[in-house]
Amino acid sequence: MYLRQLCLFGLAAVLISSATVENLNVKIHEYEVPTAKSRPHDPAVAPDGSLWYTGQGANKLGRLDPKTGEFKEYPLKTPNSGPHGLVADKDGDIWFTAISAGYVGKLNPQTGEVAEYRPDEGARIDPHTPVFDQNGILWFTNEETNYIGRLDPKTGKMSLTQVPTAHAVPYGIVILPNGTPFFCDFGANKLGSIDPSTMKIQEFVLPAASARPRRIALAPDGTIYYSDYARGYLGHFDPSAGRLLKEWPSPGGSDSEPYGIAITNDGEVWYSESGVKPNTLVRFDPKSESFGTMPIPSGGGVVRNMVATRDRRLYLACSGVNKVAVVELNSP
C-alpha cells in the first residue's frame, strides 16, 4: 500500500499545471514562399544566418535572406523526393532527408549540385529528421521503417539500427553534450538514446501510457524538453538520470497538439500549438514555470518544426499556409 501511494505521489509530482499564462508581445514576420503549394516542412539556420526550408510539395529546397526578404529556390534532381528535414553543416552545405524517395541529400548552394546517399545494403528507408553531432557525423530518424541512421559525410557510408519497439515512429532527434543522439518515439510513450560507437539503443518509458512525444529540443543544461502531441503537454526529461522531471499542460488544453519546439541560448522554451486555430506560438519560462502565448498571424497551417538562432530569433515553417516566418524575440 505504501509503495502504491509513493508511486502515485511520484506521478502526481510531475503532473504540474501552470496558472500563469500571459499574452506575448513579439514580432512575427511571415514570408510567402515563391512556389505555390510548396508545403514548407522544416526550417534550418545556415552559418550566414539565412533561413532554409524544405519545400516538400514542390520538390525543392528554399533559402530566405531575412535581411532583404529575398528567396532563392533549388530544385532537386530526383522527382518526388519529398524533402522533409534539413540541417546546415559548418561549410554552409545543406543536408536534407528525402522521406518519399528514401535517401539523404546534400545541396551545394554555390553550384546547386545535389549528392544523394543511400544504404549500401539496399535497405528501404524513409529519412525524417537530421542532426549533426560534434564530430560531423549526420544522424537521422526514419519514421515508418523504424531505423535510426548514421551517415559519415567523409566516406558516404550509411549505417542503420532498428529501434527495439515495433512501430515506434522515431521522430525528433537532438545530440546531447556528450555526443549521444537522443530521440523520441512518436508511436509510443518512449524516448531513446543511441550509443554513437555501437549504435545500441536504450529506450525510456514515460509515466503516462498515452504520451506521444513528437519533437524534442536541447536545453543549455543538457536536459531536454519535448512536445507531447497526443496529450497536449510540455515535458522535461533528464537523459543523464533517465527520468521525467516534470510536465505541464499546454495553455491550449488537451487538444492543443504541441508540435515544433526550440530552445534559445538563455533557456527559454518555445513551441507551437498546432491544434489551436489559429496556431499559437508559446513561450515557457523554466525559471518561473510560466507560459505566454500569441496567435500566429497567418494561422500557421501547422508549424511542424522550428529552430532558434544565436541572436534570439526563431525560424518557423508554416506548412499549410505556404509561408516561413522569422520571430524577433527581443521585441519590447
Image (cartoon, grey):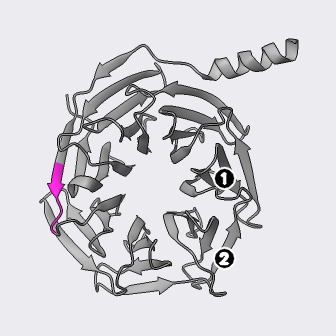
**Quarter-wise, where is residue 291 in the image?**
top left
Q: Can residue 48 be seen in this view?
A: no
Q: Is residue 311 visible?
A: yes
Q: Give the left or right position of residue 188, taking residue 78 as reference.
A: right
Question: Which residue is more in the foreground, 278 or 195?
Answer: 278
Residue appearing at x 30%, y 76% in the figure = 59
Marking on residue 159:
2
- Indicate whether residue 32 is drawn in magenta: yes
Question: Which residue is more in the foreground, 243 or 125?
Answer: 125
Q: Which quarter of the image is occupied by the C terminus? A: top left
13 lies above or below 250: above
221 lies above or below 170: above
Q: Give the left or right position of residue 84, taking residue 194 as reference.
A: left
Q: What element carries label 2?
A: strand
Q: Residue 297: image x %, image y %?
A: 17, 40
**Quarter-wise, where is residue 92 in the image?**
bottom left
Between circles 2 and 1, the one closer to the viewer is 2
Q: Is mark 1 on a helix, strand or loop?
A: loop
Question: Amino acid type of disc 2?
Answer: Ser
Residue appearing at x 29%, y 39% in the figure = 279
Q: Residue 178: image x %, image y %?
A: 66, 53
Q: Is the magenta stretch mostly helix, strand or loop?
A: strand
CA gap between label 2 and label 1 equals: 20 Å
**Quarter-wise, where is residue 51 in the image?**
bottom left
Q: Give the left or right position of residue 227, taking residue 71 as reference.
A: right
Query: What residue range appears in magenta?
Result: 30-34
- Residue that mark 1 sits on: 178
263 lies above or below 72: above
Q: Residue 64: image x %, image y %?
A: 21, 63
